Image (tube, rainbow, N blue to C red):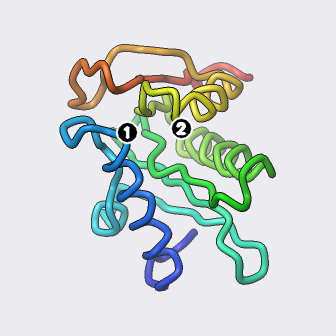
Amino acid sequence: MDDLSGPKIAAFLQEHVDEMRAITPPESTHALDLDGLRRPEVTFWSVYEGAELLGCGALKELDGSSGEVKSMRTAGAAKRRGVASTLLDHIVAEARRRGYDRLYLETGSFEFFAPARGLYEKFGFEYCAPFAGYKEDPNSAYMVKILATAD
């Protein structure tokens, strides 16, 4: 777990928010900023190799039986090294440990997000309707993984 207090993670997350805002129209950008990630219903993890920040991800509790994957990001230099898979595996395991029945996520529908959607599909996420206050949006793809059954 990361307490989100270091300058390295703050800069990494600001880069993430800036990139999402540059790619996605404002009404379709759902990336959490540092304050959003510090909310009590959000648990945040980062992956380091030595002093090098490789990636991050978060789990937001939606209610007592479901959660949402948030802020998945891999550093450019660490792409294709399994960082996102490691984080997502950890988040799914934590959601199961908490007893969630479902794990949701929202990601972009643009080609830029195709690798992320592929990763989520590989982990058993399926496309679904908007959830937890999200609205139909052609710029977003909504996905869910049912956790009640084994992989």
At mark 2, the secondary structure is loop
Few, some or many residues within 10 Å of mark 2 (<14, 14–19, 20+): some
* Image location of residue 29, percent across then percent down: 29, 42
102 lies left or right of 18: right
Residue 77's quadrant in the figure?
bottom right
Q: Nearer the viewer, residue 45 or 54?
A: 54
Q: Which residue is mark 2?
A: 99
Q: Amino acid at mark 1?
A: Gly
99 lies left or right of 62: right
Where residue 119 is drawn, which disc sits there? none
Q: Nearer the viewer, residue 53 or 146?
A: 53
Residue 36's quadrant in the figure?
bottom left
Vertical comparison of 15 with 104: above or below: below
* Image location of residue 89, percent across then percent down: 70, 43
Q: Amino acid at mark 2?
A: Gly
Q: Which residue is mark 1?
A: 64
The residue at the point 64 percent across, 22 percent down is 121
CB contact under 8 Å: marks 2 and 1: yes
* Image location of residue 13, percent across then percent down: 44, 65
At mark 1, the secondary structure is loop
